[in-house]
Amino acid sequence: MDSDNEEKDTIEDITQKRTRSFTIKNLNSTIVISLSILTAGLMIAGAIVFNGKLLTNIQSGSNSSSSGASTTSSTVNLSQFESNIVSLAGSLGMNESKFKTCYDKNTYNSEIQAEITAGNNLGVSGTPTVLIGMINSKNNTVTGRIVTGAVPLTVFTPLIDNYVKYGSTNGYSNQYVSTTDLTVTLPSRVTGNSNSKVAFVEYGDFECPYCEQLYQQVIPSIMDSYVNNGKIQFAFSDFPLTSIHPYALSAAIGGECAQEQGKFWEYYNNVYGSDYNKLFNS
C-alpha cells in the first residue's frame, strides 16, 4: 500500500508538473502575445497622437446640441461665464444692459445656425479652419483653398502672396492645404480693404484652444502684413463645436451681440486674446 501510494503520488506529481509546465508555457505565450499587441497598440496610438498634433492641431467635434464629452479646459459654470461675458462687453465700451438683453434673448441664433450650415456644406469638421481665396464681387463669394488647423504662419503666407500677386495658388501646395478649389459666401463680419479681391475666412469656435493658438501665433501677423495695409479682407464665421465645448454657442451669441453694437472685432481680439482664460477659466 505504501508502495502504491508512493506510485500514485508520483503520477500525480508528474501530472501536476506537466500541467504547471503547460500552463506556464501558455501563460508565457499569452504574455508575449499580449505585450506584442500592447506594443503595437501603443505605436499606433502614438502615431495617431503625433500625426494628429503635427498635421492638424485642430479640434474636432459636432455642432449638435446632443450631449458629448467636453474637451474644454473651462473651469467656470454657466452663471460665471455669462457674468464674465457681460463684464467683457462693458470693458469694451458696449452698453451692458443692451448686450445682456441681446444675449438673453438669443437674438442671433438663426444667423449662427446659418453660418454653421455654410461651414458644414464646405466640409468643415473642426476648428480652426481657414479658406483663402479670390472674392467674386458679383455674387459675394470666395473661391479658394482650405487650410486646416493651427498651423504655422509659413503655411499661410505663400498662399496669400500668390492670390494677391497672381489671383491663384500659382501651383503652391502644402500638406495642410486642400488640393481643390471650394466656394463659400463671404461672411458678413469682415474687416480690411473692401476693394481687395483676396479674402481670409476663418471658421472658428471661441472656446477652441487651437483657435486661440492660431490667434496668438498667426492672426496678428496676418493683420499687420495683409489686412491693415489693404491687401486682403479678413472675415470670421462662427462654427461652435457644441458637442465638446459647453460655452461655444454662448460665446458665438456674444459675438453677434457685440456686432450689433459695432464692437465685434474688439470682442474677437479680446476673447481670443487677453480675456480667453478669464472667460473660460475664472
Image: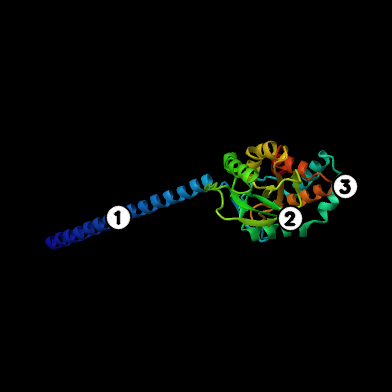
Task: Give the residue at mark 3.
Answer: 97
Numbered disc 3: secondary structure: helix
Confirm whether residue 247 shows in the render: no
Relative image position of residue 192 (x, y in whole percent)? 75, 43
Numbered disc 1: secondary structure: helix
Mark 2 or mark 1: which comes first in sequence? 1
Three-letter code, disc 3: Ser
Numbered disc 2: secondary structure: loop
User: In this image, 80 relative to 202: left or right?
Assistant: right
Mark 2 or mark 3: which comes first in sequence? 3
For this orientation, the residue located farthest to the front is: 166
Three-letter code, disc 2: Asn
Relative image position of residue 167 (x, y in whole percent)? 64, 48
User: In this image, 149 relative to 82: left or right?
Assistant: left
Q: Residues within 10 Å of mark 1 (few under 14, many from 20)?
A: few
Q: Quadrant of residue 1?
A: bottom left
Q: CA distance from mark 2 to mark 1?
A: 66 Å
Q: Quadrant of residue 95?
A: top right
Q: Please, is residue 123 above or below residue 84 in the view? A: below
Relative image position of residue 250 (x, y in whole percent)? 74, 52
Q: Quadrant of residue 218?
A: top right
Task: Give the residue at mark 1.
Answer: 29
